[in-house]
Image (cartoon, grey):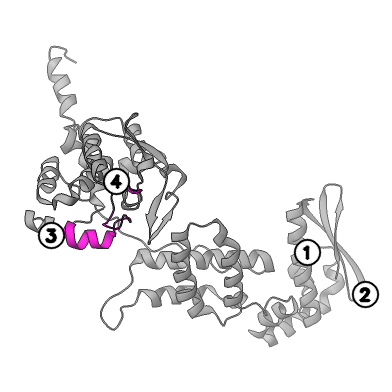
Amino acid sequence: MGSVNARGDKLYIDFRYCNVRCREQTLLSDTTSNRRKLTKLLNQIDADIRLGCFVYSDYFPESKLNNKFLSQDVQARQKKEELLGCYKTASQQLQGVSSISFAAFSNEWFLENEVRWKASYISSMKIYVFNYLVAEFGHIDIAQISRPDILKYRAKLMQRKEDGTRLSAEFVNHVMTPLRMILREAADRYGFRCQFENIKPLRVERRDVNPFTLEEVMTFLKTVKFDYRNYFAVRFFTGMRTSEIDGLKWQYVDFRLGIIRIRETYVQGKMDTTKTLGSARDIKMSSVVFKVLKEQFELTGKGEFVFCNAEGNPLDKGNIRDRVWKPALKKMGLKYRRPYETRHTAATLWLAAGEAPEWIAHQMGHSNTKMLFETYSRFVPNLTRQDGSAFEMLLSKTGEMKL
């Protein structure tokens, strides 16, 4: 095989073909990354030469050596056409690529990356990678997975099952994400072209939020089982995520400063870190939250968790939803809403009160106000009367000023 060398600050490749020394200059700067690219190119050239399929002018269309290899190019093109679909496989075999199955590489990729993932994310990725992707592509050489293979598999996932159900577009996108990551990593390591290019995610319809009004919140707190009144009051008036309030420990409640420190979460039966780095935050207690937490301290203050079951362990969110949340909504005559609407309710109530968007975003654990306005913008006019009427009132007060 040839070599990669530098002339000045630019790289060139040096190899022999038909007993002729070939040196081809490139415009690539002398960097480690570019040397790696040219080494991969030399691997491909070497494979083509050994297969008898090396067409010099295809690789170097502007080269002065093209006239020297005219007859060889004609023969190489004929040989390449004779091989047809076998050419790609044979070429990759000579480069040592075909021995890597999707299953083998996926296992290697998973082990390399799980050290940087949260426990809950690892559980999800195991399902996406092994239950779906490896089950479909596991036996296939990873370099042989084509763009049509990817698109056909995605279409297959979207088909209705025998029972009439189907996977959501959002879930299918989650499955396709690690497929893209695995193929790109394999392509980078083994020098083949990744087929997961320009494949856009499926369109996912934005789920409408359905927050409670302040009157509905107060009615709910009067209706819900008394043992869980404090729990839901904190949820409604802090905007905490389910995992955050279920994992809330007394060590993070500071009555002196009037803040709740969000530092841990309870996910899938285990304590974990916060959803994102920005989710670790200090929530300022309102007077209502301060009062109910003081009451709760009298009940569970000797234990570790603020809200817990009889054994002192975190509450089970499924049990709370089915045995506490749903009965309270039914008793109020309201249609079902997700318990997560308590978080949306906090945001809309803060907006209605005229709180600064930056402060609200911090309370919610958002890095900026972008999500706040995208999610709740349609509620602002009705909640705050900021629908253009304030400007009209200003104009009416200055009616004597004529244009």
According to the picture, the residue beneath numbered tag 2 turns out to be 19
Query: Element at badge 4?
Result: helix
**Count of number-bearing discs:** 4
Q: Do the residues labelled 4 and 2 touch (CB within 8 Å)?
A: no
- Earlier in the chain: of badge 2 and badge 1, it is 2
* Residue nearest the viewer, comparing 208 with 263: 263
Q: Is residue 76 left or right of residue 333?
A: right
According to the picture, the residue beneath numbered tag 1 turns out to be 39
According to the picture, the residue beneath numbered tag 4 turns out to be 375
Question: Distance from label 2 to label 1 (Cα)?
Answer: 21 Å
Foreground tag (1 vs 3): 3
Magenta part of the protein: which range? 302-326
Can I make out residue 52 in this image? no
- Earlier in the chain: of badge 4 and badge 1, it is 1
Identify which amino acid the numbered label 3 is placed on: Pro
Chief SS of the magenta region: loop
